[in-house]
Amino acid sequence: MPAARLALSAVILALAACGGRPGPFEREVPTPPRDGAHLVDGPRDAALRDGARADAAGRDGARADAAAPGDGAAPSDAAPAWQCVVEANGTLTCTLAYPDGPGPGSWLCADVASATECTASDGLNVNPGWTCTSVARYLRCTRTPQLPPEGSGPWYCWFDPAGARVCSNDPVYGEGEGCMPGLRRWCDGSVYDGWGMQSCGPDGTWGPCIESPEVRPRTLCACYFFFTDFTCCELASCIIPPGTDGWTCPPTSGQLCDYCSRAGQCQDGGACLFTNTGESSCASDCTNATCPAGYECRVIVDASGRQSHQCVPQDLSCWY
């Protein structure tokens, strides 16, 4: 665990099921830098923090914003074809202006391992080739990634703010450690252990990590993680794709298992819960209510020692 996180004030949390049984664990976890933020811990595989999610290591793309055509349909006067240019160093940059999408909706997409994964709260799957499942309030769909037909890989792909899919075979986007003047990358801030940016200077060395936790990679994953989690970057190397500048996550709905970053954002008396992996999401009060399938009612103890009964996922994760 980074020293910056250890510097944060720590709270010992013990969770118990509503039946009054003592919680099966106690662990020291950092207090989020938000007044009133609640914390939850659980018997989860600690390797998750190290990216031991089967499909996380290959994350190399991110969806643009809701302005992109959600169904992937090109206007009648535009052909859905790749347009490639040769860069000064001999590498290729190829752009697909109208990539295929699952259907109408405000989709957030990322290349995860060997698949493109798109998620939306208002999505509708009407296009063939996608496999979709419901996760919390989102529809999550996957398909084989679209790659340029010419040139050779490996390809490093992302989505630009206009919704186009961009792929490059320049290894600088896959290395992560190389510093080329003008490049920027996501970094782990030293103040809150939150998202920050670094720029590569003219001398070929990385500058300081400028932390701005509200600005995160343009992925839904990053919205669920206030604390830096490098599996949420647009590219696996965490190089910030050219033509992009991260984003401020759209306002949360506050519904059960939607993302949050501070107390008071969740509906139905819900707490904004932070796990020991850095994930933050909304719970819902279950003092006089039954939790939905896949959730259980637990006693949550916040940083000030106050207790409340909250519906939380049985595996304590809304994202993974």
Image (cartoon, rainbow, N blue to C red):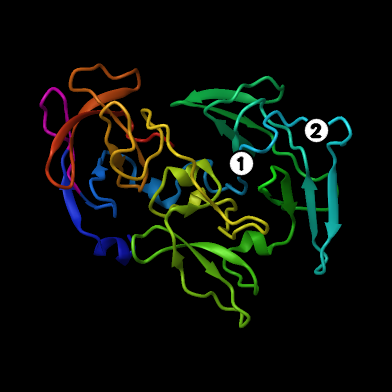
Q: Secondary structure at mark 1?
A: loop
* Rendered position, 107 above or below 216: above
Q: Which residue is mark 2?
A: 74
Q: Position of residue 99 (x, y in %)?
A: 74, 37
Query: Which segment did they paint magenta?
Result: 15-27
Q: Which mark is residue 65?
A: 1
Give yes or no for residue 21 being in the magenta stretch: yes
Name the spot of residue 119 as percent of width and height, x first: 56, 32
Please state if 159 lies on the left or on the right of 74 as rendered: left
- From the image, give the main secondary structure of the stretch colored magenta: loop
68 within the magenta span: no
Vertical comparison of 3 with 319: above or below: below
- Position in image of residue 51 (x %, y %): 45, 49
Could you say which disc has been placed on residue 205 in the image? none
Going from N to C along the chain, the mark reached first, 2 or 1, is 1
As drawn, is 64 to the left or to the right of 34?
right
Three-letter residue code for mark 1? Asp
Image coords of residue 219 (percent x, y): 54, 45
How far is the residue under mark 2 from the one under mark 1? Answer: 17 Å
